[in-house]
Image (cartoon, helix red, strand yellow):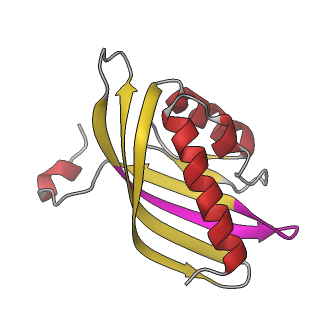
Amino acid sequence: MLPPDLAQVVEQYHRALEAYVAGDADPVLRLFSRRDDVTLANPLGPPVRRWHRVDEAARRAGAQVREGEANTFERISEFATADLGYIVEIHRAWATLGAAAERAPFALRITTIFRREDGEWRIAHRHADPITAPRPIESVREQ
């Protein structure tokens, strides 16, 4: 179970992701740490480290998503200590992705790590990928 103050930040994060799939990256980015070790591994590129790279990668990905709605979050796991916590979720939504003409459903497996910084919870790491169902081992081969 998450402490109440972290649970409140997770709810804020979920609302920020609603804005993200509608094309606005700012609410999510406001929740990220600004420390040098902050990381982001989104489904559109390799992991990045440092605030300026996280900001750039998140905005680049966010620019490819618009008209999103109907976010649902299926919590798989959660854990927290006094200063560190994580959630693992499946995020489902509808959005127009990239150059597509119509909205389509999508799902992401997301792990988000939060840490307390100067008395506030911040996202220290976020990993998202489209693996939400079993896949064959051959799917991990490099192309």
Which quadrant of the structure image shows residue 7? Answer: bottom right
Residue 62 belongs to magenta span = no
Vertical relation: 47 (above or below) 4: above
Residue 95 picture location, percent across and down: 38, 31
Which quadrant of the structure image shows residue 112? Answer: bottom right
Residue displayed at 60% across by 61% down: 11
Residue 134 picture location, percent across and down: 16, 60
Residue 50 picture location, percent across and down: 71, 46
Closer to the camera in the image, 76 or 128: 76
Closer to the camera in the image, 45 or 143: 45
Vertical relation: 45 (above or below) 31: above
Vertical relation: 59 (above or below) 29: above
Span of residues in magenta: 108-122
The quadrant of the rendering that contains the C terminus is top left
72 left or right of 39 in image: left
Residue displayed at 73% across by 45% down: 30
Residue displayed at 31% across by 41% down: 106
Q: Is residue 44 in sight in this rendering?
A: no
Residue 109 picture location, percent across and down: 37, 56
Give the prevailing secondary structure in the magenta stretch.
strand
Residue 115 belongs to magenta span = yes
